[in-house]
């Protein structure tokens, strides 16, 4: 699966993914009004507004990008209706030829972890029938429970040609409370990185492994060290734009050939129309603003590669 992502990145010349992380306050009033008029100010109405918002953004950006990253929590907050829209969004993006990275940060042990892996990446047997649930191409995984929590995902990746991105060094301000703690002479995130390389060693797809790593753009020196430590691991890089990471900051996440990382931007793209830089588009043309934000992001990142 990582080869499919790389191919899409090379075709689009855009090492980015759009984070489809919709909040109701990101959605223009005209969309909310239309959905609420039809379905009421209900969970169903909110989910419908999210779908219409997502569809416009996808329709205006799909030809520029290789991948999207919907954050499942933004859909779960609306209960079952929201999860239906999550699945609908995943399907629509795949129909457009996009690689879908499900940002679910799942992680448990044993049969529970295996069930998560099946739900997001694999297939489930129901009597004489086989079904795929969310069926994303990648999913993010929390490694806090160790190998017992990650191995079921790797097993499904090998069976289904899917991929995972394991949290290694995240972009949030308090990540260092645990991730930077020194253990046996090096920070915890480097120990996790060693395990990611180990987990991915027999899950290769060409040079790179289907077991990738989440490495934030907000800590460039750490990113550079992790790039050296994991030369054949693909990075999913959050933290660009709204979280403060710059193109210069994230350059260290890439290998010299310009591959090795895919950079995410969520509200910087989907809520671009609210930024002064894109105010000229207005709420009526929010999706055109998102398209311009994608173009600008790609230009910015490629300028340092």
Image (cartoon, rainbow, N blue to C red):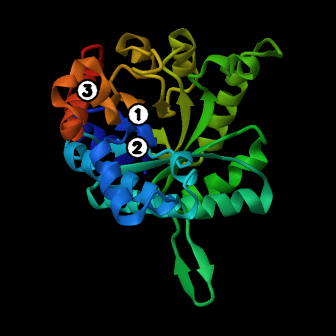
Q: Give coordinates of residue 27: x percent, y percent.
A: 36, 42
Sequence-wise first label, 3 or 1: 1
Q: Secondary structure at mark 3?
A: helix
Graded by Cα atoms within 10 Å as few (under 14), some (14 to 19) or many (20 or more), the crowding at tag 2 reads: many
Is residue 22 in view from this perspective? no
Q: CA distance from mark 3 to mark 1?
A: 14 Å
Q: Tell me the residue that label 1 is attached to.
A: 266
Viewport quadrant of the C terminus: top left
Q: Is residue 28 left or right of residue 157?
A: left
Sequence-wise first label, 3 or 2: 2
Q: Is residue 7 left or right of residue 249?
A: left
Q: Tell me the residue that label 2 is attached to.
A: 20
Q: Find residue 252 and report its image quarter.
A: top left
Q: Tell me the residue that label 3 is attached to.
A: 298
Q: Decide: marks 1, 2 in contact (CB < 8 A)?
A: yes
Q: Secondary structure at mark 1?
A: loop
Graded by Cα atoms within 10 Å as few (under 14), some (14 to 19) or many (20 or more), the crowding at tag 3 reads: many
């Amino acid at each position: 699966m990582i080869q499919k992502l790389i191919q899409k990145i090379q075709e689009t010349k855009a090492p980015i993914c759009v984070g489809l992380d919709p909040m109701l306050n990101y959605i223009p009033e005209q969309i909310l009004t239309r959905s609420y008029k039809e379905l009421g100010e209900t969970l169903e109405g909110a989910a419908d507004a999210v779908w219409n918002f997502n569809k416009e953004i996808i329709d205006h950006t799909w030809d520029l990008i290789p991948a999207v990253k919907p954050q499942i929590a933004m859909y779960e907050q609306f209960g079952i209706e929201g999860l239906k829209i999550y699945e609908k969004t995943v399907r629509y993006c795949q129909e457009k030829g996009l690689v879908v990275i499900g940002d679910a940060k799942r992680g448990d042990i044993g049969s529970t972890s295996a069930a998560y892996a099946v739900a997001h990446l694999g297939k489930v047997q129901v009597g004489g029938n086989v079904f795929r649930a969310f069926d994303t191409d990648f999913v993010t995984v929390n490694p806090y429970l160790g190998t017992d929590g990650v191995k079921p995902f790797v097993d499904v990746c090998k069976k289904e040609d899917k991929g995972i991105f394991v949290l290694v060094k995240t972009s949030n301000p308090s990540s260092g409370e645990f991730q930077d703690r020194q253990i046996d002479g090096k920070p915890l995130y480097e120990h996790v990185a060693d395990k990611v390389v180990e987990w991915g060693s027999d899950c290769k797809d060409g040079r790179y492994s289907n077991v990738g790593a989440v490495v934030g753009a907000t800590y460039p020196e750490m990113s550079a060290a992790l790039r050296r430590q994991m030369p054949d691991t693909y990075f999913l890089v959050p933290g660009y734009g709204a979280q403060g990471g710059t193109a210069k900051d994230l350059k260290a996440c890439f290998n010299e050939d310009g591959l090795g990382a895919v950079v995410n931007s969520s509200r910087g793209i989907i809520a671009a129309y609210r930024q002064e830089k894109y105010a000229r588009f207005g709420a009526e043309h929010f999706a055109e603003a998102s398209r311009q934000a994608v173009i600008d992001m790609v230009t910015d990142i490629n300028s340092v590669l």
